[in-house]
Amino acid sequence: MKKIIGVLIGLGVLIFISNKTVKNLNLNPSYEIGQKIDSLNKVVVYYNGGVGNVEERSTVNGYNIGLKYQCVEFVKRYYFEYLNHKMPDSYGHAISFFDSKLKDGELNKKRDLMQYRNPSKLKPKVNDLIVINKTLLNKYGHVAIISAVSKDKIEIIQQNPGPFKPPRLEFTIKKIKDGRWIIENERILGWLRKN
């Protein structure tokens, strides 16, 4: 019995170390870490390699933009450079951008942005910051910017989605029976918007 427990603990440690190592490695030889791969309104999206890769902290005049090439760094840099917006709380992982205690359409004071739940009474708009829930393998969640909206789809632009995922993705949106708009992906918590 002790041998079985020892083997299971050893396997668990090996899986943990392997998962951490893979998240930090650049497994895609098509790109180099820090390479420009896309942009929105002249704000560049950079390639990060493995989702756990962490580079130096990026700041502008003392304002924390985030850890280079992570998803949070892109959305905060986009809001700072393109929308001239500084968030009162300039720290936190992606999941911390969504305050689950707020009702649909209330002000998220930490980000100084209006927060909308998925589903919401208001349709998502271009430049909204979208928040995606954490998973078993990603406890930090994910954030992106809505780059296009049509009648039944939104497109997001993102940094650090993983070594083989594209910087842009589309999601279906629709108006449900009670008149609210839903982005059809159960991991999407909602979106934030500058007034």
Image: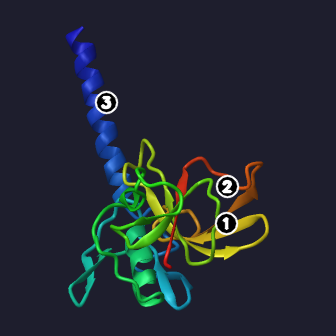
Q: Residues within 10 Å of mark 3 (few under 14, many from 20)?
A: few
Q: Nearer the viewer, residue 122 or 20?
A: 122
Task: Tell me where residue 96 sits by quadrant.
Answer: bottom left
**167 left or right of 48?**
right
Q: Amino acid at mark 2?
A: Ile
Q: Which mark is residue 182?
A: 2
Q: Position of residue 92 (x, y in %)?
A: 30, 63
Asked whether residue 166 appears in the rendered view, the answer is yes
Amino acid type of the residue tagged 1 in the rendering: Lys
Residue drawn 30% across and 23% down? Answer: 8
The structure residue drawn at horizontal position 34% and vertical position 45%, both measured from the top left corner, is 18
Q: Which residue is mark 1?
A: 123
Residue depth check, mark 2 versus mark 3: number of the one nearer the observer: 2
- Labelled disc at residue 11: 3
Cα separation, mark 2 vs mark 3, equals 41 Å
CA–CA distance in space, label 2 to label 1: 8 Å
Q: Nearer the viewer, residue 38 or 126?
A: 126
Q: CA distance from mark 1 to mark 3?
A: 47 Å
Q: Which label sits on residue 71?
A: none
* Between discs 2 and 1, the one toward the N terminus: 1
Categorize mark 2 by other alpha carbons within 10 Å: few (<14), some (14-19), many (20+).
Answer: many
| 167, above or below 95, in the image | below
Kindly check if marks 2 and 1 are in contact, taking CB atoms under 8 A apart as contact: no
Q: Residue at x 64, y 60 (%)?
A: 121
- Give the residue drawn at x 49%, y 78%: 194
30 above or below 170?
Answer: below
Image quadrant in which the N terminus is located: top left
Secondary structure at numbered mark 2: strand
Secondary structure under the numbered disc 1 in the rendered image:
loop
Crowding at label 1, few (<14), some or many (≥20) Cα neighbours within 10 Å? some
In front of the other: label 1 or label 3?
A: 1
